[in-house]
Structures are given as structure tokens and as C-alpha cells.
Image (cartoon, coloured by chain):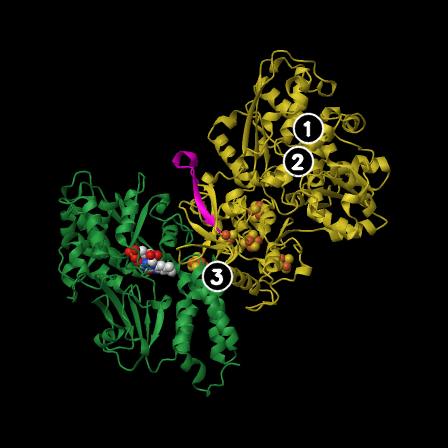
Amino acid sequence: MENKDTSRAPVSQKSHVVEKPEHPEYIGGSISVEINEKKVSVPLGTTILEACRENKIHIPTLCHHDDLCVSGVCRICLVEVEGMRTLQASCAFPITAPIKIKTTTQAVRKARRHIIDLMLSEHCGECYACVRNNNCELQSLAKEYGVDSFTFGHISEPRYEIDNSSFSIIRNSDKCILCKRCVRTCIDLQEVGVLESVNRGDKTMISTFMDKPLSDVICINCGQCINRCPTGALQANDPSDQIWRDIEDPAKHVVIQTAPSPRAAIGEEFGLPAGHSMTKELNTALKRIGFDGVFDTNTTADLTIFEEGTELILRLYKALVEKDESVALPQFTSCSPGWVKYLEHFYPEYTDNLSTAKSPQQMFGALFKTFYADKIGVDPKDIVSVAVMPCSAKKFECNRPEMDDSGWKDVDYGLTTREMAKMIKEAGIHLPEMPPSNFDSPFGEASGAGLIFGATGGVMEAAIRSVVEFVTGNKIEDIFEKANVIPVRGFEGIKYAELPLGDVVGPVPGILQKLVPNWDWLKGATLKVAVVHGTANAKKVMDDIKAGGKFSQCHFIEFMACPGGCIGGGGQPIPTNEEIRMKRVEAIYAEDESLEMRKAHDNPNVVRLYEEFLTDGPCGHLSHKLLHTEYTKRGKYIA
Amino acid sequence: MENKKIKREGAVIFSEYKRGDSINKLKEISRDDVLFELKESGLKGRGGAGFPTSTKWMLTAAAKSDKKYIICNADEGEPGTFKDRVLLTDYPELVFDGMVVGGFTIGAKEGIVYLRGEYEYMLADLELYLNNMRKDNLLGNNIAGIDGFNFDIRIQLGSGAYVCGEETALIESLEGHRGEARNRPPFPVNTGFMGHPTSVNNVETLSAVTHIVLKGGSWFRQYGTNKSTGSKLFSVSGDCEKPGVYELPWGTTISELLEKVEAKDTKAVQVGGASGICLNKEQFSRTLGYEDIATGGSIIVFNKDRDMIHVLKNFMEFFVEESCGQCTPCRIGNTKLLEGVEMIEKGEFTFRYINELKELGKTMQVASKCGLGQSSPNSFISILNNFSEEIFNQGNGGTNGK
Ligand SMILES: Cc1cc2nc3c(=O)[nH]c(=O)nc-3n(C[C@H](O)[C@H](O)[C@H](O)COP(=O)(O)O)c2cc1C
Ligand code: SF4
Ligand code: SF4
Ligand code: SF4
Ligand code: SF4
Ligand code: FES
């Protein structure tokens, strides 16, 4: 589990963690307990909830979340433990003695029903007008317990103002049940810390620093809180109404790019188990909805590898050969807008380390309204560019004021996977039934390197596939079996790898000849890289860099704001947990392996782009104008 | 301070004691001896929960850690109690010597007094007192000449929330966080302040320990009853001639107590503060003690002129405000109970709904995360049950309720 290491959690959170002995087998192994009169044996320190799940006994939960530390506040998971006066929260009760547990006694059922009734009494929301209708844990619980009336009343007037100040996240406290999952996500999982519960008693609520709107605090828009909210209290800022309007407007040419992660997850919204890629079905659905062009974000992911990889080579050349000490190394990836904003707030002194290359989404946006507009002969003012992303931060990113290098707003709307699914359903389409179809020209299909951007380690792997071939002249397959760069894969929070480049270097490929004379200066060099996902892990690595530790010696570090990388993004289908994220990642890697073209530099469409349009090459003049950007040193305090 | 002391009567707590005596006694006895005497005494925590003090200290002593803490719970937030204030101002030797004994027994080097915010005015005197202890080698290194016995005490002011008297919320607050109760298990004796084994003890408990160490467990248990050994301090307030702090042996009946404080025309007695239960006249023969009515010692007397629904409303308003707000049964439950009281006040209720609220109260007693929510329905249930005649039938000829 990438974030179960709660040692970096604030002490207040840590104290709620149910600690398990590291090696239960050494201290007597397992304990025999009775659950509903059935004897079972569980490892010491297992919570009652885990023990019940293990034995196929369902216990309702609300504040508990597999990704988060224990809280024990909703109390819905109560069970009876023989000999104890009070009922016990099963999610927070570590088994350390041979206890007898009962999970469905009259007292338990009555208590649970009361708790649901209490929550509903203060829950102001109508399910049919709610983004979480049919996917809401409170609603399901009410159903599970057969709630057919409101025992303790039901509030009908909202008490709070909706906060829709943020481009990414909307907060509706009237639907909040104070489970604090968002707080634990933001403080513990992400270590951003913009959400906290404030006040006491009946005035308790989730709030931000000084109760400021979300747009005015250091929220990085990662949306991880949305993914873990059991209700509709948190949702993404949905632009689909405007998109429908533009689709219907005959004067508008509406194009859409789809990122790899939504394709690997959107099936879940249509009832498929996690891990079914829907790339080609989605293409068909989007065309039927009325998009005028459907393109693959992987195209510009491949382009990113050219730009970002070249940038890295240039930085290394300046530092190693020209001995320019002002060069900022390690170079950090910049495709995760949550990570970018995190760095801008928490480590503003390191913005120079961020690759200036835009994210694939924004690169595509800039190309749509220049190269593409030219190509199809449409006035860029009439082009509407939409991006389907796994991510809520992409909404903020496309609204950054500097993202207008085409002369227009490069990307008009960022749409989440969930919102895309909603549009498809509204159009009367059942996605799994769609026949497959390809992406549209002139960008066509893209490489597997771009595809794996969706998983943590993917950007690094894509970069390695290209850089190693460029420099050594060898095939990546000769170094890594089937071109799978295993050392940078997997869900470990922080991965570190060293790649010796060897003593033999190849010729400099044509596209880079203007930039470096030869590769001799890399002979015998070892490329040091790291891969980090989840901003809590990013914090560890950044602090290490600040202290001059191991990671400060890296050349290139991939950072993703979300646990698991983009497949775990804040716009992805709900629920999320490690198993689901793992399945999505597997789907992406499987699709990559099934492709012929698996390296960014093999993408003929991108090569053609450099021949026809970006003629001064990667990191050349036009690239710099359209495909690169700058960052803002935001700091932690926002006036 | 010593000379300011008003002479109070009492067989145990207020019995003769000279500062330092029980600390000096530690030269002759071991940790195990202290634990033995405590066990022998049958002392249970005086903060309300009534957990055997010997067990608490034994567990803390047995826990493995390089650091341990003893915390004196001087938050005294329960409405109607002020006995800890009396101990701290007039008998600090009992409290602090008890902490030193505790440090010795559990192996703590640091003691912390969590002092109720409203008691800030005592702070200067208490600090002075601690300084004098340091001068006399009753605190500091090699205390009382016992080699390697190092222990000191610091005082931290509370945050003013009632829930911070709950031991785990207290620890959160000491650590600088929001005062919210933790999940138990793990218990503070294993995972307490800063994650280290911690014993949290009430002011009065520590004072009792001081006497027990010196005079013996069997001396202590000759007072009180079999299950409720020793005596108890009661803070008496409300409608009586002689409010104040009384030391009485456990087993005293309510009537005996009322007589002592010269209460007249008493209609109701609230035992245990807002979180306790309310008794009517027929119940005044009941006894104070763990066998019958366990209590932290707050006694509020109401005479015939009091309006019981009003009394109840005050209590419920207190809980609605003081709930820390983290768990559902307490946060919303108390609001619902208060709404019920208001419905009764207005005469707009059904018995069916009030009964549902009593059931809700029972759920809160077993489902809330900490003692606050577990005890807040006590007054709701007991007042509505014990004073139903007055509340539901008087004033409008029994037509209340539908
Ligand atoms: C809401 C709440 C408030 C409490 N307030 C106090 C208090 O003010 N003083 C106190 O000694 N114990 C208080 N307690 C009890 C403590 O949690 C704890 O049981 C006690 O400090 C243990 O000490 P003892 O074993 O010496 O009684 C409170 C408990 C609850 C649930
Ligand atoms: S949050 Fe859940 S229960 Fe509330 S309105 Fe939405 S779907 Fe219904
Ligand atoms: S979007 Fe991310 S940073 Fe913002 S509140 Fe949610 S978890 Fe915190
Ligand atoms: S906003 Fe959602 S996650 Fe946060 S406390 Fe409320 S219900 Fe829970
Ligand atoms: S019972 Fe009340 S005071 Fe205790 S944790 Fe729950 S909300 Fe907080
Ligand atoms: S799920 Fe266990 S208390 Fe909320």
C-alpha cells in the first residue's frame, strides 16, 4: 500500500492509527476469536472490521477508508464485544485478546439505524439532484437499513453556502456527514492540509484556513478528497453543460483529446470491473456524441518525451560539459498539475527544477488552435478544445492565465472521467456496446510510451525508452526485456533507480544534432532517476533534496500528485482503493505491450510534426513558444 | 499557602499530612510495595470513571518505553464540581506528593498538571509551591536522596473545553491538537502522551494515594463500603444552606447528605453533574458508592421551586455546545435531545417521539466514542423518567402530548 506508512502523518493522526505488530508470528502469531459464534483465527492486531471482512461478514462503514488511517467517528461499524459495556467501532478495534464478537444483535442494529437516522436528519440534499446518486455510501446505507422515513426529521433548508470558487473542486457542506475522510486525505495522504474540522458540537464543520474559499487557499486541486468522500459533499467543477452547448453550435468545431487513464477506468462507470480499457469504444462514443475530432493525448505525451527529454539532455550538457552551475538539477516532471501547484506552494524555490515542457493536455491545446486549425482550415476562434482527463487539477491547469500561447485559451474545458461517463449516458450510449474505432487524423495513433504516462513511473519509463536508445544507439529491448522498464514500475511510494549508460555511445540522432555535438560526455555515466507519487511522498523527497540527500544527486525525477499516478486521479470513477488502482495500471501496461509502437520517438505523427511545423526541433523557437511554459512562486500564504 | 488553610473535617483526604512524608517513605519501600498498598486499598479513580488506580499504575509500570508520563487531570469541568480546586489551593502537598509517588511507581520522569483554563489565577502560587519542592529536593534529581529517582512536574493550562477533561482528549490537547477523544484501545497506559505510556489521574485520586502510601491500604479500606473503599469528596451546590466541599465515606445516603448540607424542600438531586443522573424524593435513600450511584462527586440540589424541564434544558444546552463534534451519536444526538426538550417546553410533542428519543439516548450511551456522549443522555433519561408527573402532567391537567 503506497501510503500506509503513516510515520510521516501528523501526530494527531498517528495516534488514531491501529498499530500492527510488524512480525505477528514472532509474538505468538494469531489469536482465535469468535465472530457470531463461529471460531476464527486472525493475526494479532487485526481490526475487528478486517477480521469480519476476511470471514465474509459485511460490516457497514462510512468514515473508514482503506487508503486512510483510522478515525472511528461515524460509529456505523459498531459491533458487540462480549464483556464490554459499550459497543465497539470495529474499524478502530485491534484484536489483541480472544474476544467474542457479535455483529448483528438487536442493540447493534438499533444503534446503526439511529446513527443513519441522525445523519439523515442533518443531511440536506435530494438524491435525484445529486452527482452521487446511485454511487453514494450514505444513500446505500439508508437502503441497506431499509430507511423509509426520517425518524428524527430531515432538514430541507440549506445551512451553508456552496463553495464553487475553485476551478476544480466544489464543496457543499450541506451534504457533509463529517466523516473526515477528506481531512485525512488532505492532511495525511497528500500532506497538503487545507481541510480541517473546526468548531465544536453542533457547529462542527469542515473548513479551510480562516474559512476562505477553496480558490484562495493552498489546495492543489488533486481531487483526492473527492474520490474518498462518501457523499456528494465534494465534487468536481463540471463544465459539461457548456460542452453540450458548443457541440450543438454549428459554428463551433469541437475537438476532444482523451488521456490514457480515463480509458482504463471509464468502464467502471458502466458496470464493468476495474481493468478494462475502453479506448476504441470511447472513440466511437465521442464521435456519436458529436465531437468533430477525437484525438489521443498520448500523441502529445510522445511529444512531451521529445521536449522534456531534450530539455534534460540540454540541462545535463550545460551542467556537465559547460560546467554551468546555474543549471537546476534534478529536473522534475511537470505533467501533473497537482504536483506543479504543490511545488509552487510548498517549495517555490525549486520552480526552476520543473521541466518547462507543458503537460500533454496543454501541448495538444496549443497545437489544436495553431497547427491543426491551419491544417483543417478552421478559424482557431471557432475551435473548442476539450480534454478528458482522470484529473480535477487539469481544470485548474487549463484555466491558468498563461495557458494561451496559441493566442486563444489553449484548452477550453477539462472534463473528468466521471463527467465524460455522464455525458455518454446522457447521450443514450452504453459504452461497452460501442464498436471500436480509431483516432482521427492528422494525429492518428500514438505510442505505448505515451500510454503508460497514466501509471506512476510511466513518464520515466517512456523517457528511458527514448533517451537510452538515443544515447547508446542500442535497442531498449536489449537492456529491458520486452522494453518493460521494471525498476520504475510498481506502487512503492518512492522508487529510485540507477541506469549505467555504458561506455559505448551511438550517433546523435538528426533531430538533436543542432543541440549537442556528440554523446562522448555521457560515456560511462550513470543516469540516476526517481519516481514519486502522492504529494506526501513528494514532500519526503523534496525535504531530502533540500537537505542535500540522495535524491539531490538524481538527474530526473517523476512526480505525480495522486497515489498510483493519473489512474488514481481525482477525476476517476469512485470508489478507489489500491486493488482498483492496480487493476487500472495492469490494463494500461497490457495495452502498451499489445502495441507495435512503444517508443515515443517511433511515433511517425510526432516526427512529421517536427518536419512540418515545429521545424526548429525540440526545444526550438516555436516549441518554446507553444509547448513550454513558466511557473509561479506561490508560497504558502495567499493574500 | 500552608497557613491559609481552612481546617476541614475528613477521615481520609482531609486527615493529617505533612508535605514530603509520603515521598520520604519511598526511601523504605519499593514500587511493588506501593502497588501492593494501592491494590489493598481498593482505590478507584475519583475522576468519574472509577477505574482501579492500582491496575492503571501497574499497566503503565509494566509498559515498555524509555519515556513515561504521569498526568494530573485538573480540568475539573463537570458543572457543579469544585473539589479539585479546593485540593489544589489548600492541599497542594497531597496532589503533588501523589504525583511524585506516581512517577516513582510507574517510572515516569515527568509529571504534567493539566490545569483548567479558568484556574489560571492559581498558577503563580502553584509554580511557587513547585519551586519550593525543588529547593527541598522533593522534585528534581535524586529526590529525597533516593539514588536515580529524578522527577519533575510542569503545569499546562487547559483550553477551556469540557471534553478536554476526558483523558485522551486531554492528551490530544496537551500535544497541541484539537481536543478530541481518541479511539481506545490503544489505551493511554500503553500509548498516551506523545505515544508513550501515560497514567492520567484525577486530583483527588492522587491525593488519596498520598495518604495510602503513608498510612497503608488497609487503613484506607476501613472507611467506606466493601466495594467502595475510602471516602469521597463531594462538591455540593444549589438549594441548600451550606454548599461546599464535604468529605464523606462512601455509602452515605442522599438523605444523610442533604441533612448535612441543610437542604430544605428538596425536590431533586443531580448526582454527578450534567453527565450524571437526577433523583427524585423516593430515591433519596439510595447510597453514594460504586454499588449504587457512582459519581465524581458533584451534587446539585434543587428545591421545590425549580422547574425540572428547565433544569434539563440547561444540561442539554451544555452538551450540544460541549460535544467535540467528531462522532455522530453525540454531535447530532444531543441536538435531537435538546430539540425534544424544547418540544416538551412548548407542549408540541408526541409520547411516541419522546420515547424514541429515550431510545436514542440509550444508543448514545453505548455508541458514542467517548464518555461525554456516553453520559450526556443520563440526565435526559433520568429527568424525564423521574419527574414525568411534573413534566408531562402538571400545569395543563394532563393534556400535554398527543
Ligand atoms: C467528558 C469528560 C470529562 C471529564 N472530565 C474530567 C475532569 O475534569 N477531571 C477528571 O479528573 N476526570 C475527568 N474525566 C474522566 C477522565 O477521562 C479520566 O477517567 C480520569 O481523569 C482518570 O483519572 P482517575 O482514574 O484518577 O479518575 C472526564 C471524562 C469525560 C468523558
Ligand atoms: S449525497 Fe448521497 S444521500 Fe445525499 S443527496 Fe447525494 S446521493 Fe443522496
Ligand atoms: S483537492 Fe487535494 S489539496 Fe485540495 S482539498 Fe482536496 S485533497 Fe486537499
Ligand atoms: S466532505 Fe465528504 S469526506 Fe469530507 S467530511 Fe464531509 S462527507 Fe466526509
Ligand atoms: S462522544 Fe461527543 S465528545 Fe466524545 S468523541 Fe463523540 S462527539 Fe466528541
Ligand atoms: S467506519 Fe468505523 S467508526 Fe466509521
Marks 3 and 1: in contact by CB < 8 Å? no
- Image mark 1: chain: A
In the image, taking residue A562 as reference, residue B131 lies left or right, namely left
Tag 2: Cα neighbours inside 10 Å, few (<14), some, or many (≥20)?
many
- Please give the label number shown on residue B59: none
Instruction: Check chain identity for marks 1 and 3: say if they share one.
Output: yes
| Camera-nearest label, 1 or 3 | 3
- Circle 1 residue: A305
| Image quadrant in which you'd find residue A417 | top right
Q: Colour of chain B?
A: green
- Circle 2 residue: A454
- Image mark 3: chain: A
Ligand 6 within 8 angstroms of badge 3 C-beta: no
Instruction: Name the residue at 25% across, 67% down.
Output: B234
Residue A594 visible somewhere in the drawing: yes
State the SS at label 3. helix
Disc 1/disc 3 C-alpha distance (Å): 60 Å
The amino acid on which the numbered mark 3 sits, given as a three-letter code, is: Ala
Residue A264, magenta (yes or no): no
The amino acid on which the numbered mark 1 sits, given as a three-letter code, is: Ile
Residue A319 picture location, percent across and down: 58, 21
